[in-house]
Every structure is written in structure tokens, then in C-alpha cells.
């Protein structure tokens, strides 16, 4: 009997020892700090799940799931979903595997917000406040609506005609202090604007495109050159300006002759393109037909003429001649729309 009892106890001890060995493998795996969890599934503060520089799941600089710059799930600066410039690429948040900021953050390039690139386009300087700035006259045959100031740089305020509403801010060479010289300074900044635009290299060369911008044409950000046309540049149809989601994108359309915009033509802003980042630099005159919808700052070497019911979301800047309107609307972009540009 005692031999049988001894054998039984021996078997029990061997079984208990095996259980301890199994637990030493499985239990330690459940609490492996490299997995970022304790045995109950909770997040740890060790090298994996948190802390500064955690390697897998979080912390400020964690490489997989979170932290300020995590490589997979975001952090304060996920490149796709959130944050303001860190290395995180996918899901966002400020730590942990899913992160409290989630998808979106504060500036991810794919899910919204700024791409982090700075604006490198031209600026209008003191011409910013003007919807229309001409050299010697601004006229309208029928009532036109201006959102922004109206000015002439080389003539008296009396050469601004047809804008009798007292709400309009009109300036000329005879404006009194503190606005004396305002239009001359603004026109000087238009000259500087041209000096910025003209030397820029062409990103897109359309000099061999017969007829100019006709039909449905999509332009990408950068400088589009049409400067070797021997005749007018014609806009006829739809011109799409596609910023590709970059609110800092700019468009320069540059021609060394005249620009004619056909009746009913439209410029369409797409994917975060902004009127304040669009510049039409034309060496000679610009003529708009009827019912045109146009966007951007139009800089004409000579005169600008707009026919009935056309609208411009931007500015009409005539360097050496007048601006002549006929029941049009010109709206200068506001600082609220374009703080990064203006």
C-alpha cells in the first residue's frame, strides 16, 4: 500500500511540475512587455506600449501605433490622417494603438488639412485691398458690384465713374492723407508682382497648343507658359485649376499677347484651389465676354474690359490703362479665405 501511495504522490508532483513549466512559457508570453500589454490585456508603460520612445505601440515617438510621430498609426503629425508634420502614416492619435485624435488630426495630408508645404507663389502687396486697380480710369456702363476697393494710380478719383454708392471706397492720385499716394504704392506693388512672375521657369509649356485654352482643359499648379503665341490666348469652354488637395498651391498663367475670354467660359477651382493663389499675367489687354465666371488676379499690361453679367472672383489690375465694366461683379479675396497667401 505504501508503495502505491508513493507512486501516486510522485505522479502528482510530476504533473504539477509540468504545469509550472507550461505556465513559465505561456504566462510570460501574455505579459510580454514587447507586446505592450499585461496578462489581462492592459497597456503597459514599458518599451513597447508607452513611455518616451516606445518601440511598438505608443509613447512619444513609438514606431508602430502612436506617440508623437509613430510610423504606422500617427501621433501628432501623421502624414496621412492627422497631426502637424510628424512621421506617422496611417491612423492618427496622440498615443496608443488607435489614438485619441483618430483619423483627421490637425493637418494630415490625405484626410484633410494642410500638407505642411509652405506657399511659394506670388503676393499682391498693397494691391490686396483692391477689387479693381487701374492706371487712369475705372468705368461701368451699367451697375456693377465691387467687393473691395476701387482705385486709379495716375488720375483723380473723378475718373472712377458709375460707382455712386457711398459704401464704395474709391482712391486716386488726389486722395487725402492718410491715403494720399496709396494707389501709386499699390500700382508699384503690381509692378513688383510682375517682376516676381515673369522670371519664373515654365512648369507647363502650352506654347504649341493651337487656340490656347479651348474646350475642357485641366491645369496643374505651377507656371503655365503661353508666351510664344503670336495671337490672342483664347479661353473658350472650361479651364479646371486642380490643386490636388494642397491649399498652398498656386497657378500662374502667363501670356505675352492678349487674353480673350469667350462668352460663357468658366474657370473652375478644384481640390483646394483658391482664387487668391491664381494669377493671370497677360502682357497686353484682357477682354471678357458675357456671362463669364472667372477666378484669379488678372494683371493686364494695358486695359481690362468685361461685358455684361461676367464675374471675377479675384482682382482686375490694369498697369497702363483703364478697367471698363458693364454690369459685372468683382470680388477681392478676403484675408479669411487666404491668410497663408495674402
Image: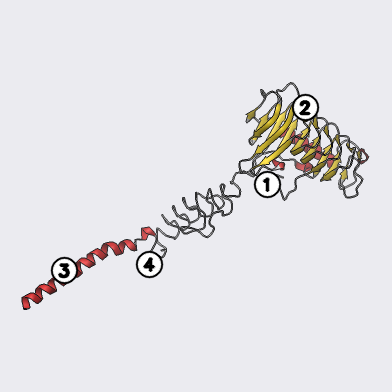
Vertical relation: 74 (above or below) 31: above
Quick one: 227 or 241, which is closer to the camera? 241
Kindly indicate whether the residue at mark 3 contacts the one at mark 1 (C-beta within 8 angstroms).
no
Which tag is nearer the camera, tag 4 or tag 1? Answer: 4
Which label belongs to residue 314? none
Q: Residues within 10 Å of mark 1 (few under 14, many from 20)?
A: few
CA gap, disc 4 to disc 3? Answer: 29 Å
Vertical relation: 243 (above or below) 96: above
Q: Residue at x 77, y 29 (%)?
A: 260
Q: Which residue is mark 2?
A: 258
x and y percent of residue 246 in the render? 62, 43
Which label belongs to residue 40? 4
Q: Which residue is mark 1?
A: 340
Q: Earlier in the sequence, mark 2 or mark 3?
A: 3
Residue 86 visible in the snapshot: yes
x and y percent of residue 163 in the render? 90, 43
Q: Which residue is mark 3?
A: 14
Q: Residues within 10 Å of mark 4 (few under 14, many from 20)?
A: few
CA gap, disc 2 to disc 3? Answer: 98 Å
Q: Is the N terminus in the top left, top right, bottom left or bottom right quadrant?
A: bottom left
Vertical relation: 131 (above or below) 217: below
Q: Determine whether the residue tagged by mark 4 lies in a helix, strand or loop.
A: loop
CA gap, disc 2 to disc 1? Answer: 30 Å
Q: Quadrant of residue 161?
A: top right
Kindly indicate whether the residue at mark 1 contacts the one at mark 4 (C-beta within 8 angstroms).
no
Q: Earlier in the sequence, mark 4 or mark 2?
A: 4
CA gap, disc 4 to disc 1? Answer: 49 Å
Which tag is nearer the camera, tag 2 or tag 1? Answer: 2
Q: Determine whether the residue tagged by mark 1 lies in a helix, strand or loop.
A: loop
Q: Determine whether the residue tagged by mark 3 lies in a helix, strand or loop.
A: helix
Q: Residues within 10 Å of mark 2 (few under 14, many from 20)?
A: many
x and y percent of residue 258 in the render? 77, 27
Amino acid at each position: 500500500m505504501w508503495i502505491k501511495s508513493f507512486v501516486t504522490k510522485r505522479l502528482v508532483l510530476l504533473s504539477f511540475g509540468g504545469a509550472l513549466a507550461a505556465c513559465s512559457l505561456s504566462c510570460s508570453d501574455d505579459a510580454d512587455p514587447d507586446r505592450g500589454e499585461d496578462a489581462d490585456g492592459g497597456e503597459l508603460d514599458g518599451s513597447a506600449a508607452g513611455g518616451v520612445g516606445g518601440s511598438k505601440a505608443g509613447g512619444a515617438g513609438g514606431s508602430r501605433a502612436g506617440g508623437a510621430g509613430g510610423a504606422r498609426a500617427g501621433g501628432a503629425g501623421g502624414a496621412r490622417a492627422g497631426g502637424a508634420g510628424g512621421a506617422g502614416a496611417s491612423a492618427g492619435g496622440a498615443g496608443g494603438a488607435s489614438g485619441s485624435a483618430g483619423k483627421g488630426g490637425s493637418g494630415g495630408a490625405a484626410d484633410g488639412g494642410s500638407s505642411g508645404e509652405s506657399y511659394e507663389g506670388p503676393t499682391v502687396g498693397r494691391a490686396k485691398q483692391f477689387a479693381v486697380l487701374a492706371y487712369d480710369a475705372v468705368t461701368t456702363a451699367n451697375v456693377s458690384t465691387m467687393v473691395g476697393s476701387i482705385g486709379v494710380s495716375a488720375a483723380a478719383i473723378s475718373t472712377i465713374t458709375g460707382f455712386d454708392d457711398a459704401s464704395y471706397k474709391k482712391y486716386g492720385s488726389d486722395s487725402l492723407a492718410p491715403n494720399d499716394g496709396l494707389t501709386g504704392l499699390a500700382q508699384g506693388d503690381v509692378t513688383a508682382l510682375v517682376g516676381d512672375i515673369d522670371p519664373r521657369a515654365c512648369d507647363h509649356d502650352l506654347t504649341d497648343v493651337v487656340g490656347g485654352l479651348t474646350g475642357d482643359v485641366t491645369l496643374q499648379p505651377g507656371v503655365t507658359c503661353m508666351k510664344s503665341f503670336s495671337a490672342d490666348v483664347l479661353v473658350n469652354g472650361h479651364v479646371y485649376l486642380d490643386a490636388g488637395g494642397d491649399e498652398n498651391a498656386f497657378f500662374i498663367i502667363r501670356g505675352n499677347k492678349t487674353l480673350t475670354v469667350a462668352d460663357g467660359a468658366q474657370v473652375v477651382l478644384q481640390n483646394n484651389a483658391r482664387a487668391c493663389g491664381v494669377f493671370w499675367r497677360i502682357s497686353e489687354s484682357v477682354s471678357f465676354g458675357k456671362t463669364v465666371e472667372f477666378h484669379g488676379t488678372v494683371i493686364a499690361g494695358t486695359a481690362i474690359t468685361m461685358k455684361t453679367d461676367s464675374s471675377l472672383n479675384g482682382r482686375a489690375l490694369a498697369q497702363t490703362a483703364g478697367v471698363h465694366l458693364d454690369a459685372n461683379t468683382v470680388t477681392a479675396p478676403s484675408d479669411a479665405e487666404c491668410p497663408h497667401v495674402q
